[in-house]
Structures are given as structure tokens and as C-alpha cells.
Amino acid sequence: MSIDNLRQKINELPSRPGVYLMHDGQGRVLYVGKARSLKKRVQSYLRHKNYASPRLRKLVSEVEDISVIRTESDAEAFIVESRLIKHYQPFYNVELKMGERYPYVRVTDEPFPRLVVTRHKESDGSSYIGPFVHVGELRRMLRLIERYMPLRTCTEPGSWGKWRERPCVRYSLGRCLGPCAALCDAAEYRRRVADVILLLRGQSAELTSRLRERMDEAAARLAFEEAARIRDTIRAIWKLSRQRVSTALSDDVDELTWKALLEIQEVLDLKVVPWRIDGFDISHHSGNETYGSCVVFEQGIANPTMYRRFRITAGDGPDDFRSIRETVRRRYSHVLSDEGSLPQLVLIDGGPQQLRFAREALEEIGLGELETVALAKKEELLFRPGRMEPVRLYASSEALRLLQRVRDEAHRFALSAHRGRQKKRLARSSLEDIPGIGKVKAAELLARFGSVPRIAQCSEDELAEIKGINKTLAGKILAHLRGEIFDDAENE
């Protein structure tokens, strides 16, 4: 490419964050860089002729073409840049090849591991998480860990067979489990380390799910102080996740997922890499009780904490087209009102008609710029707005497999609504079999205690707190339910 054509191409670059790739005459990638403004950054290479660095002068002299990948933020640009450098191994990328520009968190290879912030990765048996794009975000996470999930910071004793007589002051402050004085076992400490690693890798949803299970277990054991501590930890994680700019560039985004995301961007002609994909589906049972579902995949991984489900009210009888429109509208109207985040790609389970109704909903609420695609079953064709012909991918395509996972998860989540309704109906009918319990009292019992097994675990006094239920009736309820549960257990 001539220098004039190259200048013209550079002048037409967007003033947005992204990644640029410099190619030589054979198309080989010489250098990969990121920028807050692609146009300004790439123009700067042509603006300066006498670079102090001979290496930089040589790079500029070899450049014959430039390509770019637009991203939504500087943090996302870093992730894309780093992945491309690992993939192409350009000759002129030294810093990111070595991985030393941004900090890592080292989880030491010890019986009771510590956390150490470092900018160098070594082959020492330790686990390394990162690099972290935003150091401020890393500091916030480390403060949260120190307060709610603290690990030891001391480097003593050298041999863990020799215990201290008393732990350090951090144990007294609740900032350490006291492994140095044998005040916690190795299994408990390893579980704490596993929680910390999940948080550092950005897997807040999985961590929160685990913590909720432990909180419920603690409450069931009447260990209310422990349950309250876990609750406070969950709240702190939630607040931190609301502030997060980006996650660490962890190994969780494996090469297949990375390849799939780039392929999706290419085949669908998207402006940015679809780090977040929202999937929609509609489900109805025998023409009744229609539900719309929305699932969220971030970096190719499902995030159940962001799933949403809606009971459809549009029209009489099943109508998948109107139902899709209502579901999409309600999902993103809610996001807009709460100033929530938006996906880079919306995936609709269906064909061109479902896609058209989804587009109508987005246009109505002012989100017409959101990228959309429909994935039809059986033939597995992709439909895009404005394209006459569908896109067909090979069955072995990683992009297709990822989109299928999103679609299938949306379908599963929509169907689960019907299973939940069926369980509630069965629970209510079980209660209504008890003399003196009608629909109203059955509904109140379920609303108060959540399920039939939990009601069976209550005392007569607890049940008698419900209006219209005295101790005599409470005793009948417990006798009926406990006998029913015992019979069920015997029959299994």
C-alpha cells in the first residue's frame, strides 16, 4: 500500500478505543497496540519521523498496512490486545509478550497460601491471577479480601509443624484465621483460598452462589452470627461488582472461547467483540402461562445472577412474536431505569420474524443501536437485520457452538418456570388436603415458610402465628406433613 493510501486509511480511523495491528508487505503482524483513540494514536506514528528508538524507526519503515478492532473501553482494548499478542507473537511486542506491564496476584505454593502482588510471573509452583488492567480495582478487591475473606500475611513459621503459642494481632482483629497457631484446619483454609481466587478471577456469580448456600446452612444450624458474616460478605461482593470496570485477564477465557468471540464479531460484522451476549426465548405450556426468558453470557460463561424471566401478558393465547417483543422491551426498560449495563449482542431464539419483533421493541425504547441476531433451530441459520440471506456456519464452528449454548440455556431457563409453577401447585394441593386448610391458608403458609418441607420443620407456635391457625390446627398440619414426608422417604 502506498504511503498516501495508508495516510488516507489512518485519517478515516474512528476516534474510539480499540486495538490496531501493523502489517508488513506479506500481511504478517509486526506490532499490536491499543489506544483510547485509534485515530490519534496511529496518526502519531506518521507524525514523528525522527524517533529516538532505532527499533521504532525500523518498525515504522516496515509497515505496509494497518487494521483495527474497535472496542467499547480502554480496559476491553487491553484484553483484546493481550490476546492478539499471545496469538500472533509479533516481533516488536516485547512488553506484553513478557506480561510485565500490569500486576498479577500470586497465590503462593504453601500449605497455607498467601497473596502477593507482583509484576513478574515465575515458574515457582504458585498460581498467578491477572494481569489486572486497573490497579485501583485490584486494590479495592484486596481491601475486601482483607476485611471479609482474610488470609495470612506472615511469612513465619518456616516449618508448619512448629506452631506459635498464640496468634498475631491480626487474628484478634478478625483479619486472619490463625493457621500459625493451629486455630483452623487446612480444609477450612483451602476453602477460603478457593473463594478468594474466584473473586480475583471475576467469577462473582459463582462465589455468591456458594456463599448463599453456606449462609442457608448456617441459618439452619441456628448459627446466626456466622450467617450474618456471610451475608455481609455477599453484600460487599455485590457492591464491588457494581463498581468494577473490568476483570483480570484470566485463563478462564480460554483459547476456544476467544476464537469463538472473534469469529462471531467477524461473521456478523459487529463493531466490537461481543464480550456479553444476552439470549432470549419464549416458552408456554399447552398454550397457557407464557414465559419469556433472558440469560446472560459474559466472556463465554453463563452469569445466572443476571438472568431474568417474565410472565407474558400480551394478547390471548400463545403468540411467540408478541411475546418476544414484550420480553425484550421489559428486559431493557428495566435496565435503562436502573442505569444497568447492556450487551454487545442480543441473541433471539427463532427466525427473521422473531428478530423483527425484537428489533421493534428495541427501537421503541431507544436502543435501536444494539446488535441483534436470530438463531433458527434445525438448520441452525443466523439471521441479521438488513441482510437478505442468512449466515450458515459449519457445525464445527466454535462461534456456532457458543451461540447454541446461549440459545439452549435461554430455552432451559424459560422451561424451568413451568416446573417451578408445577411444584407450587403440588405443594398447595398437598396443604389443601389437610382438613381446615383452604387455598388462602395454604398460600399464606407457603408465602411465609417457602416450601412444604420447611413448614414440616416448624414448631406449633411458629405455625400458630399465621392468622386463622391455632395450636390445634398447627398440630394437625405437622402430623399430616411429617407423616407424608416420612411415607415418601420410605417409598423411595
Image (spheres, rainbow, N blue to C red):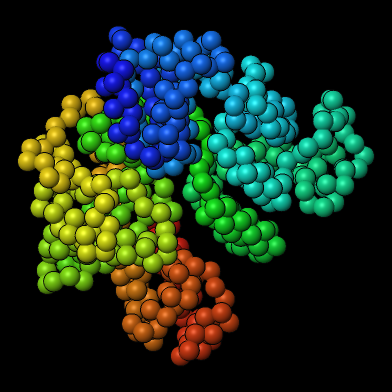
Closest to the observer, 103 or 2: 2
Q: State the residue at coordinates (65%, 26%).
A: 119
Q: Taking 301 as reference, is 176 left or right? A: right
Q: State the residue at coordinates (57%, 15%).
A: 52
| x then y, percent, for residue 209 | 51, 51
Q: State the residue at coordinates (88%, 43%).
A: 168
Asked if 183 appears above or below 422 in the picture, the reply is above
- Quarter of the image where one finds residue 323: bottom left
Closest to the observer, 471 or 238: 238
Q: Taking 21 as reference, is 137 left or right? A: right
Asked if 352 appears above or below 396 in the picture, the reply is below
| x then y, percent, for residue 229 | 67, 58
Closest to the observer, 418 or 356: 356
Asked if 325 appears above or below 428 in the picture, the reply is above
Q: Residue furthest toward the left? A: 388
Q: Is residue 407 visible?
A: yes
Quarter of the image that includes the N terminus: top left
Q: Taking 136 as reference, is 272 left or right? A: left
| x then y, percent, for residue 107 | 66, 31
| x then y, percent, for residue 206 | 50, 46
Q: Is residue 284 visible?
A: no
Q: State the residue at coordinates (14%, 34%).
A: 391
Asked if 440 appears above or below 396 in the picture, the reply is below
**Total residue callouts:** 0
